[in-house]
Image: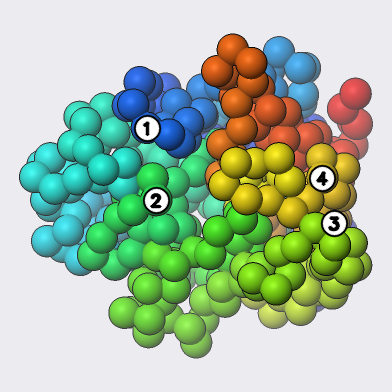
Amino acid sequence: MKNDNKTITPLNTIPVFYRPEMVAANVGAYSPSAAKPAQAVADWQRQGLPIEVLEFPPVTEAQLKAAHHEFYVDRVMHGLIANGFGNTDAQVTASLPYTSGSMLAAARAALASGAVACAPCSGFHHAGYAEGGGYCTFNGLMITALALKAEGLVKKVAILDLDQHFGDGTQDIMGQLKLSTWVKHLGVGPMEKQADEAERYLKRLPELVDGLKAYDLLLYQAGADAHINDPLGGWMTSDQLRRRDRIVFAAAKRIGLPVAWNLAGGYQRDADGGIEPVLAIHRETMRACAQVYLERQPR
């Protein structure tokens, strides 16, 4: 399939870039994101979703410092200042090059196939140039964009951030490094994030993605905290979230825009204190991805 000289390679499975080193368990935070990669991948495997789990290298110190102030990177990695979880937990520190490495690997794979790949992690978009916060320490979205640009693999990158919360860290890095000429950052405006606006937004979403045709890569944050039952806000039902994801994937495939997506957000708990409601949302994102891109359709 070709579109403006962009070729999409048919996939039999969705590439998922996961390593146990991405996980930092029991960090005592409200957000489950540090431990979520392992839980999400295990859930997809239990459900029989057609994924292929692949290894990848961590990002380098130089790649971290291309997106963040050198002083900030050094102090975080030596445990001298708090990470995005507000602590200096060594497990979190060790996981950070791998979570961003997952995003970079997924982007490389999506560019290679012209199709799609997944980084099963979150904790990026509140990380700014010289500070973290909101459970985000390093901004894997911007690290990925800058690494690919430096290697000449992309000229223009689009970020579609459909987390419930604005990617202020992404915007900060773009401003500090003056990247707006080649990075486009799209989120959802505060006036749109109302339950009665969800259907209108979904109708506009295909056109929004179509407008990214000139870009080489889409980094898509499929936020689970946009669910209407999320304790930190939300405006879409489960069905609307499923449709949101399918719209993004289908529109991107139609225009030949490679997509690397990650999990992002999600704070619901079940009766046992687990995150099954969040995993259920991520499960449907993966299912939508497979339905759009694979020859063999998932159940």
Where 110 sits versus 46, above or below?
A: below
In percent of width and height, residue 9 lies at 77, 49
Residue drawn at x 36%, y 72% as measured from the top left: 173
Q: Residues within 10 Å of mark 3 (few under 14, many from 20)?
A: many
The numbered disc on residue 237 is 4
The amino acid pointed to by label 2 is Gly
| Disc 3 secondary structure class | helix
Q: Are marks 3 and 4 in contact (CB under 8 Å)?
A: no
Task: Tell me the CA gap for discs 4 and 2.
Answer: 24 Å
Where 136 sits versus 89, above or below?
A: below
Task: Tell me the CA gap for discs 2 and 1.
Answer: 11 Å
Task: Tell me the CA gap for discs 3 and 2.
Answer: 28 Å
Q: Is residue 122 visible?
A: yes
- Closer to the observer: label 1 or label 3? 1
Q: Which residue is mark 3?
A: 247
Residue drawn at x 37%, y 38% as measured from the top left: 98
